[in-house]
Amino acid sequence: MDHNLADFRLESLDVGAAPVVQHFLQRLQLLPLLQRHLPATTRRPELVPSALTLTVLITHLLLARRPFYDLSNWLANHVPEHLGLAAEQLPFFQDDRFGHALDQLYRTDRAALLFALVRHTVRVFQIDVNQFHNDTTTVTLSGAYDQQAPPQAPVRPPHITFGFNKDHRPDLKQLLFCVTISSDGAVPVHADIYDGNTSDTQVHIDTWNFLRSLTKRVDFLYVADSKLCTHDNLTYIASQQGRFLTVLPRTRNEVAWFEEQLQQQEMPWREVRREANPRRQHGPDHVYEGVESPQPSREGYRVLWYRSSQKQARDERSRQERLQRAQRRLAELHPRGRGGRWRSAAALTRAAQRVLEGYRVAAYLTVNVVERVEVRQQQQGRGRPGPKTAYEQVEERYYELTVVENQAALARAQRCDGLFPLLTNDKEMSLEDALAKYKYQPFVEKRHEQLKSVFEVVPIWLKNPERVAALLWLYYVVELVQALLERELRQQLAAAALSSLPLYPEGRMCSSPTTELVLRALGRIRRHRLMNGSGEVVRTFHDGVSEVGVQMLDLLGVDRGAYGLA
């Protein structure tokens, strides 16, 4: 039977990487977990429950990150089944539905929900729980948020306020976002949100207690930056028979003592780590030497000192650059006004001292103020000079600087180049192991960087602090899915004896696939359905999936059928 082409309609919807995200959300059992923990709604039975709305929102944060007011358009262009939805549910997704779902999440015991989610993740994905790394960042917000509950209120969301801003925006309000990852694929196993003016030193005891409850043990290694190094934090973890590894702050007396000892005697340094130069193929290796301080910290913990060849060169270069800039600035010092000479030795001394302190070179440059005397002829009396004009000799005093490098101080500084100290209460850990474990710390910082750049946590288009807190909890799940996807793909690559995948532009090989690259490789695939006048599907077909895309689906265990593949 012949049909007129006008009787047919072509429906084209995005598939993209949504099936991959759904695969991991299902493995996490996120929807059942949300259904069990979310409080009962006071509304009539909903066609789209809040738990399902939140899973859709997480998928959106991973794939698109558009404002809430544009979410309905984004959903309308996607295959609903790959988002866990039925087609008849799509019209019900409006701004207020997402807002209501966030309200429901805020009223949930999010700590209990997080614990259940992480415990399930550790069990299903077999996450190693022997070592954890903690770090904090700030989430900057640009709204006024002047209707918040007072800080002393017993029950309230984290207070959005001013604090030490790590985005270098002290003019904006913020929240403190704390994340802890495993050393096995940098999987986030804990996250919490604090008031914007909370000090980093205040998050560690709560985090350590969460990890103890999660692992049901105390002998895991807790690694953090120098903000862990307070008497209360260290004493608490040690009193619970826990283990920690952190950086000893340079403000501690132990640092000055060791550097003084280093000036007076040689230390038994030995090589503990060597790495190939990551930037220059034939450049010098990065070498780390280590020695344990003969004197423990004031609390009685081990102080492990390291000297990095890379940091040594960087410290030397930084000092030389500061010296050169300071010397140029000193040579250009001029007093205010039209005269170009200093008439006051005290004023010149103060100006020079400000330069030395500004460039932090006061210990390396010796500045002397020298008095100069200039004799010149000065006319006696007024008027135009003529043959009978009388002159007298006048002495004019002014002051100049002489600058001399303190070679002894520079030599002493060079002996301390490249140093950094670690502090631990583990009595068995070797210098090699301590350094190797601490060098995993940048991975948690990388999670923060991806939160702000890849997943664009800012700007947050919400005025309600409760909804902001709930949304940031969802961003934890976003980071969790991201980490699990990367970990799973890399593990499967290793199991298949593959070293890389052609994920970079022009088919260049990538040895460490990231979530961003995986989602981008699958991001433009669409499903097309040809329908007749009665709305019946005549034919279904998909855009082609690249060879590397098919390979990734198989490695991740994602059903090919979502992409129309056998």
Image (cartoon, helix red, strand yellow):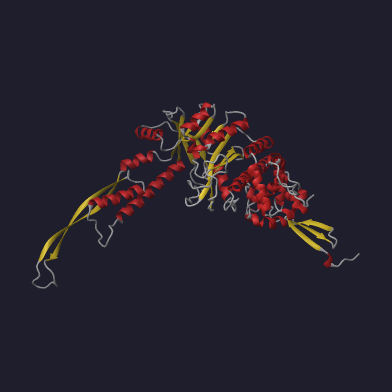
In-front residue for pair 493/488:
488
Q: Dividing the picture into quarters, in which one does residue 30 lie?
A: top right
Q: Dividing the picture into quarters, in which one does residue 116 lie?
A: top right
Residue 367 visible in the picture: yes
Please state the horizontal and vertical placement of residue 275, each as a whole percent of the image. 52, 40
Q: Residue furthest left?
A: 388
Q: On screen, 263 above or below 381?
A: above
Q: Quadrant of the N terminus?
A: bottom right
Q: What residue sits 47% from the left and 50% below the top? A: 170
Q: Is residue 172 left or right of residue 505?
A: left
In-front residue for pair 400/455:
455
Please state the horizontal and vertical placement of residue 289, each as a whole percent of the image. 46, 35
Residue 486 visible in the picture: no
Q: What residue sits 62% from the left and 48% below the top? A: 510
Please state the total of marks drawn on the protein image.
0
Q: Dividing the picture into quarters, in which one does residue 159 lie?
A: top right
In-front residue for pair 203/276:
203
Q: On screen, 413 above or below 48?
A: above
Q: Residue furthest right?
A: 1
Q: What residue sits 65% from the left and 56% below the top? A: 69
Please state the horizontal and vertical placement of residue 457, each as a whole percent of the image. 58, 50
Q: Is residue 420 left or right of residue 537?
A: left
In-front residue for pair 122/553:
122
Please state the horizontal and vertical placement of residue 269, each as a whole percent of the image. 44, 33
